[in-house]
Image (cartoon, rainbow, N blue to C red):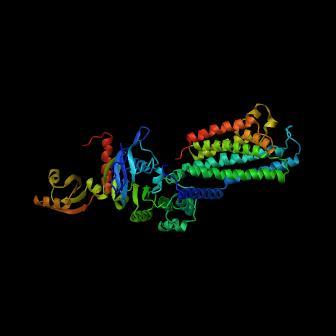
Amino acid sequence: MPEDSHTDSDHVITVQHLVKRYGGFVAVNDVSFSIREKEIFGIIGPNGAGKTTTVECISGLRTPDSGSISICGLSPHKDRNKIREFLGVQLQESSMPPRLKVGEAVDLFASFYPNPVNPDGLLETLGISHVKNSIYKKLSGGQKQRLSIALALVGNPKIAILDELTTGLDPEARRETWALIESIRDRGVTVILVTHFMDEAERLCDRLALINHGKLAVLDTPEAIAALAGGNRVRFVPSQPVDDKTLYNISGVVEVERKERYITVTGTGDLAASVINSLARIGVHVSDIEARGGNLDDAFVKLTTHDASNASGGVQP
Amino acid sequence: MTSVPSESKEKESRGHFSELLKVEGKLALREPTGLGMGIGLPIILLVVFGLIGIANPGNVANTGYTVLDLYVPVIMVIGFIFLGITSLPVTLVRYLEIGWLRRVSTTPVPPSRLLGAQLILNLVLALAAILIVIFGSKFIFGAPLDVGIPYFVLSIVLSIAVIFSLGLVVAALVPSQTVATGLTGLLTFLLLFLSGLWVQPAQVGGPLATIMYYSPSGAAARALLSSVFNAAPPLETVVTMVTYTAIFALLAIRYFRWE
């Protein structure tokens, strides 16, 4: 089978039918996706879903059992030396020698690459130039994380893989890191972001791959995924009792939940309007109405738990 | 590696290696336990045995050697043991454990360069220890050394090879820094004993002397003893060290993992 027989010119990474096993455990099971140039591509999923293994295969740290990966037409395994020159990687749970200074670390990594960026400028951009002479073990969690990002970027990469970027950061540092990722993308870098934070994925990513139990559950924009599972929600109090059948007949309604006097319907389209109009037609008025769009969190929980019950052979009602 | 390295690439690779060496050197100075034991301890032992030699002139157990004569090679071997068995594997295992080797392996530079830089650093320290012990014993304590350069170089190369390769086996096999520290401590103690630090094989005789002579550190000390008095190292010491080195190197290569 010819490798990368068809690669779209604007696709910098193509993963096809990727499979990786650890012993009898299938960590990644037939995952395929393509990443466009200059997008922030998110890989989300529960812990242990196979996210890290997927990016480790892309970065050439692990060899897939089957399937193919093409990065700008190159193979991470065969052309690993070539690819490493333009692929920056920030690893999950990777640390540095405790007494290595920030400035030494970036200078060292700059010396590893053919066309590095200016290390001092990078530290400035990342807001850690003031700790240039501090040793690694004296840095705060946020500073360590920034240094880790600096090492991933100092080689002036075309593609950056960032794994669990903001885990362990406080909310302010997270927001600053997000702004940083956007600025990296604006400089023309394609970013692959592995995360299990839905707010991060929603805020940053152009497209998301949701991986669950080693399989690609869904691949779409954050908005589309949010709408896909759950969609919009409308909560209201009807002026008189309404039965489920009536509610399910309203166009767009997918699910109905009741709690005390409140009814919550979930569905698609302009849900609030169609609920109000349809109920008005049969003489029911609604009050205390509250509508909100579906969010990624709901979608994530729904998609992953649904899949889990399927996988464990659970019976759907 | 399909592309032909251009000249600028060559320059690049020298650039990163000198940068790696520089950083490893600075780190060694900031955490000078290895440095202190690899060089400081030989200096202390040299002074101690130099003074003992002055207090107890005459040869030991009819060997024809004075106390200091007998201990010159042992002290050098002790320096190698602390560098190759105590310092090197613990540093490598730590790099492995904290993911530093893995981190480096995502760059165009293979992580083996980090190992190379560590080896060179420790070899430089070993060389410093050799020079200090040879010149110190000869010119400060008046040991009648007559270093036969070819014999000496052969003995030194084999001694360092056998001890450092054993250190690499430890680095390859132990799972964590804690285990590495414990195991290298034990191994260091054993090798120090076999090298003759507490009791010389010539003094104990019998099967224990044989065991010492055919151990990595004992063979090293014995070969060095001959070579500092301009004699060829006994053939069995050479064979012993070559055999151990081959076995250790194979084991280290077979089991070393970069992550």
Q: Quadrant of the N terminus of chain A?
A: top left
Residue name at image x 67 percent, y 52 percent? B34
Nearest the camera: A261 or B6? Answer: B6
Residue A120, compared with residue B152, is above or below; it is below
Q: Position of residue B89 (x, y in %)?
A: 62, 47
Q: Position of residue B216 (x, y in %)?
A: 70, 39
Residue name at image x 30 percent, y 46 percent? A306
Q: Position of residue B195 (x, y in %)?
A: 74, 41
Q: Quadrant of the C terminus of chain A?
A: top left
Residue name at image x 65 percent, y 39 percent? B245
Is residue B37 shown to the viewer in this render?
no
Q: Position of residue A310 (x, y in %)?
A: 30, 42
Query: Position of A99 compared to B4: left or right?
Result: right
Query: Position of A48 compared to B214: left or right?
Result: left
Nearest the camera: A34 or A55? Answer: A34
Task: Classify residue B192 by image quadrant.
Answer: top right
